[in-house]
Image (cartoon, coloured by chain):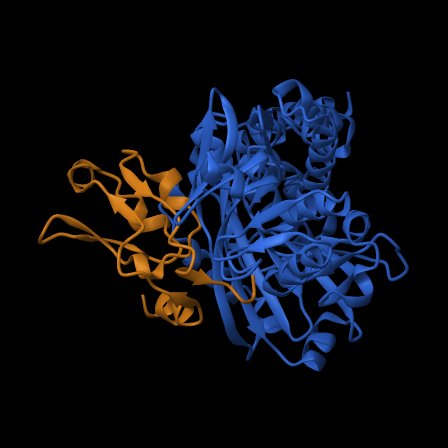
Amino acid sequence: MSDLEDKLYTVKYTPDSNSHLQPLQECCRLCKSKICTIICPAGVYEWDEINHKLIVNFENCLECGACRIACESCSLGWEYPKGTKGVTFKQG
Amino acid sequence: MMEQEENKTDVIVVGGGPAGISCAITIAKAGKQVVLIERGKFSGSKNVFGGAIYAQPTRQIFPDFEKSAPIERKTVEHKYAILGEKDATVISYKNKSEENVSYSVIRGKFDRWMAQEAEKEGVILVEETVVRELIVENGCVKGVRTELEDYYANIVVLADGVNSLLARQIGLRGKLSPKDVALSVKEVIKLPQEIINERFHVNNDEGCIYQIFGGPMLGMLGLGFMYTNKSSVSIGLGVTLSELSEKRIKPYELLEELKKHPEIAPLIKDGELLEYSAHLIPEGGYKKVPLLFGSGVMVCGDAASFVNNLHWEGTNLAMISGKIAGETAVIALGKQDFSEQALARYQDELEDSFILKDLRTYKDLMDGMEERASEFLGYYPKKINSFFNMFTTTDSVPKHDKYWTFIKSFFKDRSIIEPFKDLWTVLKLLWSILK
């Protein structure tokens, strides 16, 4: 995990106060694969075993859209962050 | 209605990447009003690619770009690295005199430059603005709704990238599935210019592109890449989202493995990570091209799935499709006809261009590769390396015996039917490409 943190540390973000990623938690609870916790290149999604809840570290989002397409229960509300917010790539 | 008239322009282009900018500048040069809406802080700030741009198509939009654009290095060498688990076979093609070259660029610099050039031609650039939806009246696209305001136009061009939520909103395209996209992760690693020159055997302004097969991606439908910039190296990989999902692999862990491979590690040794990034690549090809136009609307670039994945072409298809959409818009404005029939010219021109011709040529490629990925991107890369291992190893075993052991292994490694299946797939692909 620390490897990924080092990587994300190099990315410039202007985080919003509200999440642009809105999973339907009731669908996430039923979802077996929880594939978003694997494929997200920024590790945005973590499954909280204790509270049975998907944690969304939306401020780390690289806005690629992989979770939107991979989500098997198709229950993920996904939109771009506001125009002034989100990631700014300098080396893309 | 008053508001509609005040906020109305000839054309709105959504997305300030290569497709959108090329479209907008084409329209502005013809003397028409065009507003280019970019959601990032500046053009290129949300964009990621390998990557390289291609001189010939870029010159069609920016004839003298080589004089003033922020270019990193001119590609003089293409390397194809076939990685085994620990070994590698590398094929190199070098050409320093070619005219239609490619250049490595950084999107944050290059796209920004292109957008500034477009502004000089009269394009009105609106940054930090997200188009949330299209305004549609009687089946005709009339404008865009942003977070703050509604803007109206005779034509809206969608150049909003691989995720194109807008093309989806109006039903021009369906849902993308995980096998239609590759998830790409990339790192830009800072190294002194002289070190890059030494390690990649190039002069100051010359660069090298690596296409990487196998290694940590052995058997997966995915490839790695490396590009030299002035004083950094871009390294990354792209694997279909379906493959990552099925095998439950974290993309950045795969990249870490690639960076550790004995063929790759010395090239980036002691470099400092400048930036990590991720992006989706449309991989569906011809079969996933959406409806390209409708009443008052056209779709170009990644939003239209215009990527030639075998040749690693994308920005060129984006630019030229944007240009054709721009020319079509200018003609439509001349006739004041923005109907579906009027904009059908866009599709006709694309059909006549390399864009849809090339995508059609390779329309069956991904299906074939997907079917046999573990063979073509796993078994054979390993086999190529084991051949050279056998050929170069001196161990007092008679060569005759070695050759026969190697030949027999093709029938022992796998079921006897597998080589025939591979041959069948290759013949099918060749037929679909060459017919």
- Vertical position of residue B246 compared to residue B331: above or below: below
Q: Nearer the viewer, residue A85 or B353?
A: A85
- Vertical position of residue B353 compared to residue B344: above or below: below
- Side of B333 where B276 appears, left or right: left
Q: Colour of chain A?
A: orange
Q: Residue B26 location, x and y as percent?
A: 73, 44
Q: Nearer the viewer, residue B105 or B193?
A: B105
For image coordinates 52% across by 57% down, the residue present is: B127
> Dividing the picture into quarters, in which one does residue B308 lie?
top right
Q: Nearer the viewer, residue B270 or B36?
A: B36
Q: Residue B133 location, x and y as percent?
A: 42, 37
> Dividing the picture into quarters, in which one does residue B67 lie?
bottom right
The answer to whether residue B397 of the structure is visible from this angle is no
For image coordinates 52% across by 29% down, the residue present is: B141
Residue extending farthest to the left is: A50
The answer to whether residue B62 of the structure is visible from this angle is yes
The blue chain is B
Quadrant placement of the C terminus of chain B: top right
Residue extending farthest to the right is: B97
Q: Residue B136 location, x and y as percent?
A: 46, 28
For image coordinates 81% across by 47% down, the residue present is: B60
